[in-house]
């Protein structure tokens, strides 16, 4: 009789042990799936990279417009600071004013400065220089668009197509969002501009309520007008 009771106790103990092991295993699987989904979401949002174009002569500005004072800091820093809200890593493509921009960005550890030796061939050469650096989905914007809001970037992230362009009242602006699947096509493109490359593909219009996607700085007068308009 003792043996029967002992056997029953053994079965009950083993059953309880198996139940506990199964519960722990199920909990472990749940935690694994939860963190896996969380990590994918994190990667989807924060493994986005950025390219800021800053290789030009600023010929109509008569000096380096990227380092002109705007909103208490260099003009290009305004563009970079907003982009960094959605981009883990940013590549600034320099050219004619390389040394000056290098000095301006010396404390920006999340920025990598890439010198484009072909800057005299135009902006698209800087676009390609930037495309050589990225390996994730990315945004690209000229450095003289200091007023584009973070919400524009986030709206572009919610699009579907491989290239997404913000639109305000039917006019297209910056930044562009480009999926990583197009990096090779962009690098090897025979087009003469980013606009030509964009128009050769089935890109997506993303309507935004931000006129600043259209506002760049070409001349000193442009900067003064913007400062007056936003009371800086």
Image (cartoon, rainbow, N blue to C red):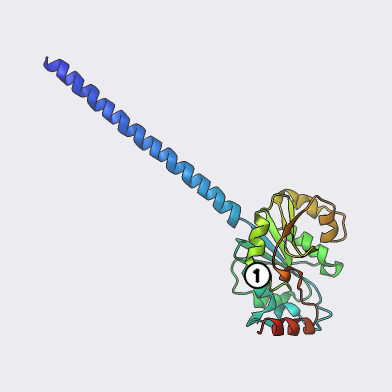
Residue 199 location (% of width, % of height): 84, 55
Circle 1 SS class: helix
Residue sitting farthest toward the left: 2
Within 10 Å of the Cα at label 1, are there few (<14), some (14-19), or many (20+) other Cα atoms?
Answer: many
Q: Residue under label 1, please give it.
A: 80
Instruction: Using the image, determine if residue 179 lies above or below residue 150.
Output: above
- Closer to us: 161 or 84: 161
Residue at the image position 67 percent from the left and 71 percent from the top: 79
Instruction: Using the image, determine if residue 26 lies above or below residue 99.
Output: above
Instruction: Using the image, determine if residue 199 lies above or below residue 54.
Output: above
Q: Quadrant of residue 8?
A: top left
Residue at the image position 76 percent from the left and 70 percent from the top: 214
Image quarter where the N terminus lies is: top left
Residue 170 location (% of width, % of height): 79, 62
Q: Quadrant of residue 226?
A: bottom right
- Closer to us: 146 or 98: 146
Instruction: Using the image, determine if residue 2 lies above or below residue 64.
Output: above
């Amino acid at each position: 009789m003792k043996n029967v009771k002992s056997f029953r106790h053994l079965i009950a103990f083993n059953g309880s042990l198996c139940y506990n092991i199964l519960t722990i295993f199920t909990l472990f699987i749940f935690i694994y799936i939860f963190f896996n989904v969380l990590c994918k979401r994190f990667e989807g949002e924060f493994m986005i990279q950025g390219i800021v174009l800053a290789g030009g002569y600023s010929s109509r500005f008569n000096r380096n417009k990227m380092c002109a004072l705007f909103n208490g800091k260099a003009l290009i820093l305004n563009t970079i600071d907003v982009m960094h809200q959605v981009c883990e890593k940013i590549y600034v493509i320099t050219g004619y004013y390389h040394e000056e921009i290098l000095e301006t960005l010396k404390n920006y550890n999340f920025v990598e400065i890439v010198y484009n030796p072909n800057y005299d061939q135009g902006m698209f050469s800087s676009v390609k220089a930037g495309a050589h650096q990225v390996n994730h989905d990315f945004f690209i914007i000229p450095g003289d668009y200091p007023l584009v809001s973070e919400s524009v970037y986030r709206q572009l992230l919610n699009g579907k197509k491989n290239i997404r362009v913000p639109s305000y009242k039917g006019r297209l602006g910056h930044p562009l969002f480009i999926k990583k699947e197009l990096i090779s096509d962009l690098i090897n493109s025979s087009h003469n501009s980013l606009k030509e490359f964009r128009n050769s593909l089935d890109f997506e219009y993303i309507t935004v309520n931000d006129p600043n996607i259209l506002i760049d700085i070409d001349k000193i007068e442009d900067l003064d007008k913007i400062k007056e308009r936003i009371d800086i």
